[in-house]
């Protein structure tokens, strides 16, 4: 949790400045509306708890894909 802005809003703002930016959001929230919003924006999501191997595998997969348009 960040003061004054949440992760998805920050990611949207950064993507406006850098359209090809790859984003992996990490959350412990389970609210379906929040998770649906993240998916609709095309952000990758990793839910807590996760292992170091899960994190590195997801980051590698994201970096290996073509950037979003």
Image (cartoon, helix red, strand yellow):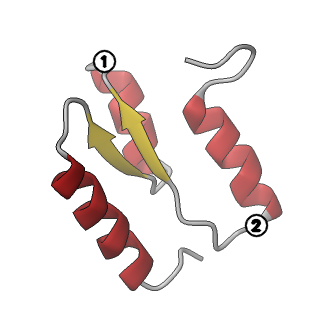
Residue 53 image point, x, y percent: 18, 56
Q: Which residue is mark 2?
A: 18
- In the picture as drawn, the residue positioned furthest to the top comes out as 3
Mark 1–mark 2 Cα distance, whole angstroms, equals: 28 Å
Which callout, 1 or 2, points to the residue nearer the camera?
A: 2
What residue is at 63 percent from the left and 67 percent from the top?
A: 21
What residue is at 54 percent from the left and 65 percent from the top?
A: 22
Q: Is residue 32 or residue 46 the one in the foreground?
A: 46
Label number found at residue 31: 1
Side of 14 relative to 27 (left or right): right
Residue 8 image point, x, y percent: 56, 36
What residue is at 36 percent from the left and 64 percent from the top?
A: 59
Q: Above or below — where is 62 with respect to 6?
A: below
In the rendered image, the quadrant that contains the C terminus is bottom right
Q: Is residue 45 or residue 35 the one in the foreground?
A: 45
Q: Above or below — where is 29 with respect to 20?
A: above
In the rendered image, the quadrant that contains the N terminus is top right
Q: Earlier in the sequence, mark 1 or mark 2?
A: 2
Q: Is residue 39 or residue 58 the one in the foreground?
A: 58
Dot 1 surroundings within 10 Å: few (below 14), some, or many (20 or more)?
A: few
What residue is at 38 percent from the left and 71 percent from the top?
A: 62
Q: Say which quarter of the image contains residue 16.
A: bottom right
């Amino acid at each position: 949790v960040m003061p004054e802005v949440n992760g998805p809003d920050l990611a949207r703002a950064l993507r406006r400045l850098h359209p090809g930016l790859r984003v992996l959001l990490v959350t412990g929230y389970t609210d379906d509306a929040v998770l649906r919003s993240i998916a609709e924006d095309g952000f990758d999501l990793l839910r807590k708890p996760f292992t170091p191997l899960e994190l590195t595998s997801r980051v590698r997969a994201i970096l290996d894909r073509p950037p979003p348009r």
